[in-house]
Image: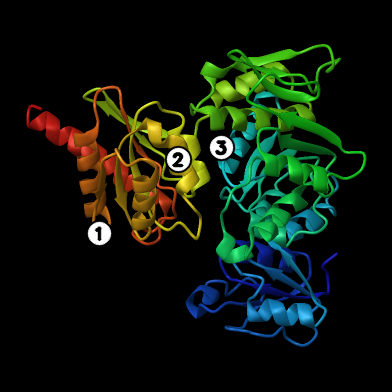
Amino acid sequence: MFAGRNVLVAGAGVTGRSAVRALTERGARVTVTDGNAERLAELAGLGADLVPGLSEPPAGTDLVVTSPGWRPTAPLLVASAAAGIEVIGDVELAWRASRDLPNPATWLAVTGTNGKTTTVGMLESMLRAGGVHALACGNIGLPVLDAVFEGYEALAVELSSFQLHWSSTLAPHASVVLNLAEDHLDWHGTMASYAAAKGTIHAHSAVVVHNADDPWSVRLADSYAPAGAKRVGFRLDTPRPGELGLVEDLLIDRAYGPDPRHSAEELISAAEVRPAGPHNLANALAAAALARAYGIDPGGVAKGLREFQPGAHRAVEVGEFGGVRYVNDSKATNPHAAAGSLLAHPSVVWIAGGQLKGAAVDELVEVVAGRLRGAVLMGADAPVIAAALARHAPDVPVHRVASGDDEAMNEAVSVASDLARPGDVVLLAPAGASLDMFRNYAHRGDAFADAVLARATGSADDGR
């Protein structure tokens, strides 16, 4: 498929390196470009020509493979499209390359604004519990382009809107859009474009799964599901025929049983699903829908959920001190994610702030106002959140801390601890990106955990 073709790889990061390796091993003539000459030089020895800062494709280019971070408006990509050269992403490249394999893995694909990583982790755990040689990959860390050549039976693939934007023939066995809310509008331009990128995950799927509680998820399934695809829904309520859902405290499957219209299969109790919270019950139902589509029985689903270990910085409890629990959900990098995290607790001191990327926060604040003991704000868009709190939760005490990395987080945790009462949760659920103050969301979460533990140790040392 790629032998003898002239391929330009745009971007020399992790996905760029994977693309170069896969293409050169399959006989393509590869050129790589990147604006960062130092990063580009790290690909020396992989058999590709390294050319910094290209704004037009070299003569004779047959295909451009772009890294997901490159925007469609990048001059090189615009020039390539104008020249009639196909532009694809690393995920589309992985899909096409996998079609040449004798026993390609089955893809089970997950996208959405929030919950993707938790869902593919749950799905991987279910598949493995069912005896399947499976791996979670994609936007979760390991590039799918590396995973497709490793001999797995099934892949739980996390896909971002960036990756889906550059995919056209991707055909997973089953796919789900978990939810949709404002995010990455600086990249896509409009909510419609963002939604369209997400919807393409369904375009060639055999099983299309939707969240019946999320209007966007339903709309995208309606718009993009191919004729003849099996449709499966999930909801945080009694499931209808063809759905998974909740009956009292049990996760129930009415989609894959011997007679979905008249029978229901119990999967697991809601209390056994970790992390806690309604949004994670929804993630578990979505993962179960995909696992059942692959053929995992209810016992494998339950075993997988019991064995699942939540990822770092995703609603992880740091500890409980003085009757107050401290929870690190630094991965809640947009208002929709923060809402799910806040709604998991009845009384919260909220640590929030960062870069909102143009997203509105009024609806979030209005929904959670009754749960807030107090709010501690930091980062570039702290004033935006403060204004929303003043409008919708005027009685909630609000404290703003200055910028300053770990020092600011120490102050935030200290103030939040003083506001909290026994039974409360001090919750880091920022609703914004972290790069205004931290290297990434993990650095922010680590700073929170360190500050909590330092305060707890100090309190113990002081006899408090």
Residue at the image position 42 percent from the left and 51 percent from the top: 441
Whether residue 225 is visible here, answered yes or no, is yes
Q: Distance between the Cα atoms at labels 2 and 1?
A: 29 Å
Residue 419, above or below 264: below
Give the mark, 2 or 1, whose residue is nearer the N terminus. 2
Mark 3: give few (<14), some (14-19) or many (20+) Cα within 10 Å. many
Q: Residue furthest left?
A: 462
Mark 1 burial class by Cα count in 10 Å: few <14, some 14-19, many 20+: some
Q: Position of residue 26 (x, y in %)?
A: 78, 65
Q: Residue at x 54, y 79 (%)?
A: 35
The residue beneath circle 2 is 366
What residue type is disc 2 on?
Glu
Residue 292 lies left or right of residue 69; in this view the side is right
On the rendered structure, is 43 left or right of 392?
right
Looking at the picture, how far across and down is residue 228, in whole percent? Answer: 92, 39
Residue 118: assigned label:
3
Between disc 2 and disc 1, the foreground one is 2
Q: From the top left corner, tell me how far across and down residue 426 is, in percent.
A: 31, 34
The first of marks 3 and 2 along the sequence is: 3
Q: Amino acid at mark 3?
A: Thr
Residue 445 visible: no
Alpha carbons under labels 1 and 3: distance apart: 30 Å
Q: Residue at x 62, y 38 (%)?
A: 120
Q: Which residue is mark 1?
A: 404
| Colouring used for the render | rainbow
The numbered mark at residue 68 is: none
Q: Which amino acid type is marked by label 1?
A: Gly
Q: Residue at x 69, y 58 (%)?
A: 192
